[in-house]
Amino acid sequence: MADEDGRMDRRTFLLQSARALGAIVGGGALGAAIAGGSDDSLVWQIDPDKCIACGNCATACVLTPSAVKVVHDVDICGFCDLCFGFFAEQRPGDTEAAENQRCPTGAIIRNFVEEPYYEYMIDETKCIGCATCVEGCSQYGNGALIMQVRHDRCVNCNECAIAAQCPADAFVRVPADDPYLLRSKKLEEEAAEEQAGAGPLGRETEPSYQPPPQQQPPPWQPTREQSAAGQGFQPEPVSDQAAQGTQPAPEPQPHQPPPAAGNGEADSLQDLIGGDLR
Ligand code: SF4
Ligand code: SF4
Ligand code: SF4
């Protein structure tokens, strides 16, 4: 209690100091909770539509190797023979030799399914989260290879060290019971919403997300047949549509993935990414 001169006795000082300290500690905890760090119902995840495959995920994580891995969203994979997530753009040949591969650690496994399809699986023990394959797949393929925080590794830091360095604001908080942001799931949800919102005449609205059409190999890239014949790339003749300034329709993509290769065990996303996708 303060005396007549405004001075506090020792007991009152200690009591008030303890209250102030409690307020500071309590305020800090509240701040952390507001920041999302102590909220176990939310976890960090990467929005694949924002990620620009800059490569920071490999080195910025507090864990080594990073808790971010590439995930293969099998449901939208084209099972391409010439997959640019797997093959380097500039390479001496089209075999699966290490020098022809894009991944620096050999973490992508390529299996023949049936002509002309191949399946691609990720060995997560080798993946360092460098995003090199993501860049290739999104540039020339369907965008089936995406970066994701793997929750069997991530320690859910209060402030994710990668989020602080991500140049694309791709790190977001998502519900812990639904912690992955797959493009295939988003497409499914949009299709369901579209169906539910179809008008009385059955007219449907345009979905907001369209997967990029699979593109042809870049001009400097010989096709497999040309490589075998020792020829360089010959550009396609300009179509009438192109000459008139319109774009030809993208080539149709295979809608149904072919049966899994060999032993038929890899028939789900969880099997294909080789880990516990929870
Ligand atoms: S830091 Fe961001 S933009 Fe870069 S690879 Fe990771 S998620 Fe993608
Ligand atoms: S993210 Fe990097 S290390 Fe992982 S599979 Fe892709 S290229 Fe290989
Ligand atoms: S929350 Fe922590 S452990 Fe998880 S990805 Fe970010 S930095 Fe790595």
Image (cartoon, rainbow, N blue to C red):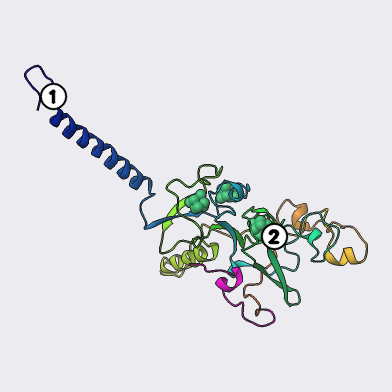
Q: Is residue 141 left or right of residue 68?
A: right
Name the residue at the left extreme.
4
Residue 138 visible at all: no
Total labels drawn: 2
User: Along the line of sight, which residue is nearer the eye, 190 or 86?
Assistant: 86
Name the residue at the top extreme.
5
Q: Which residue is mark 1?
A: 8
Q: Give the x, y percent position of residue 33.
A: 33, 47
Q: Is mark 2 within 8 Å of ligand 2?
A: yes
Q: Tell me: residue 147, above or below residue 110.
A: above
Q: Is residue 23 magenta?
A: no
Q: Give the x, y percent position of residue 94.
A: 82, 64
Q: Secondary structure at mark 1?
A: loop
Q: Which residue is mark 2?
A: 85
Q: Is mark 1 within 8 Å of ligand 3?
A: no
The magenta segment is 261-278
Q: Secondary structure at mark 2?
A: loop
Magenta residues, dominant SS class: loop
Q: Residue at x 45, y 45 (%)?
A: 159
Residue 119 visible at all: yes
Amino acid marked by disc 1? Met
Which disc, if any, is residue 90?
Answer: none
Q: Residue at x 39, y 56 (%)?
A: 42
